[in-house]
Amino acid sequence: MAYAEVEIDAKNIAKKFGSRTLFSDVSCRLASGDCLVVTGRNGSGKSTLVKILARLLRPSSGSVTFIDGGKACRDWEQCLRYIGFVSPEIMFYENLSGRENLEFMARARSMRLQSVRVEEVLTEVGLGSGGSQFVKTYSTGMKQRLKFAALLALEPAVWFVDEGLSNLDADGRSLVLGLVKRALTQGRLLVMATNDLMEAEYATQTIALS
């Protein structure tokens, strides 16, 4: 699969919870190499919109279509293989090591990671010495780094990143911003929910929720 072929077409997205309309009439067309940044105050629906664009949550109305090589992807499993997700809601198996978590995630996608590749991505995110430790011993910052290690290992064409800089120290923030910059130069498509100005600098499109 060529990264440059993947697009997302979102039309007239709305989301309601009971009688409350969280947002409505949200549309965008994204191609590989684009970076959509979703901003807004707490409770405005940033995370919800990102999940809808990833097709992990159904909108109340509107549509989201993944397009590869000019053809719409209708099958959920076909769409799923394109995406990687970083979110506060992503959880790891606490009684597995960081290395074992990455290997398990790969198997869940019918992938087999070579051990040398696992070590490479753990080292790249600063977890090389902690890859054999149980995740239950990790700090919140280490768990955040492990989420980005998963992105690097699984190599999805589309990155969905919700509050990617949360729980990270200065070195961790610099690492993540470098990964974002590199992903875009590689032709990946990024969707990020953030109010952080450093992440927002990479936006090619912005949606501000009120």
Image (cartoon, grey):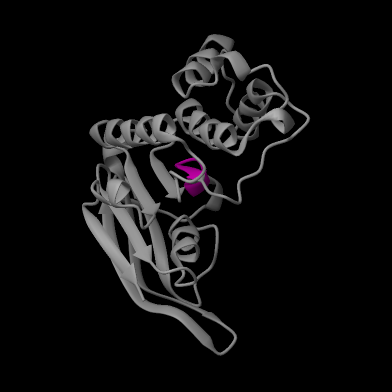
Does residue 81 appear to the left or right of 63 in the view shown?
right
> Residue 106: image x %, image y %?
60, 29
> Residue 109: image x %, image y %?
59, 34
Residue 70 appears anywhere in the view = no
Does residue 156 appear to the left or right of 91 in the view shown?
left
Instruction: Find out whether residue 4 is within the magenta segment.
Output: no
Q: In this view, which residue lies farthest toward the front?
A: 170
Q: Residue at x 51, y 28 (%)?
A: 149
Q: Which residue is drawn at 27% across and 35% down?
A: 181
Q: In this view, which residue lies farthest toward the bottom?
A: 19
30 w.r.t. 171: above or below: below
Instruction: Find out whether residue 82 is within the magenta segment.
Output: yes
- Image quarter where the C terminus lies is bottom left
> Residue 158: image x %, image y %?
39, 43
- Image quarter where the N terminus lies is top left
Residue 164 appears anywhere in the view = yes
Magenta region, residue range: 79-85
> Residue 205: image x %, image y %?
23, 57
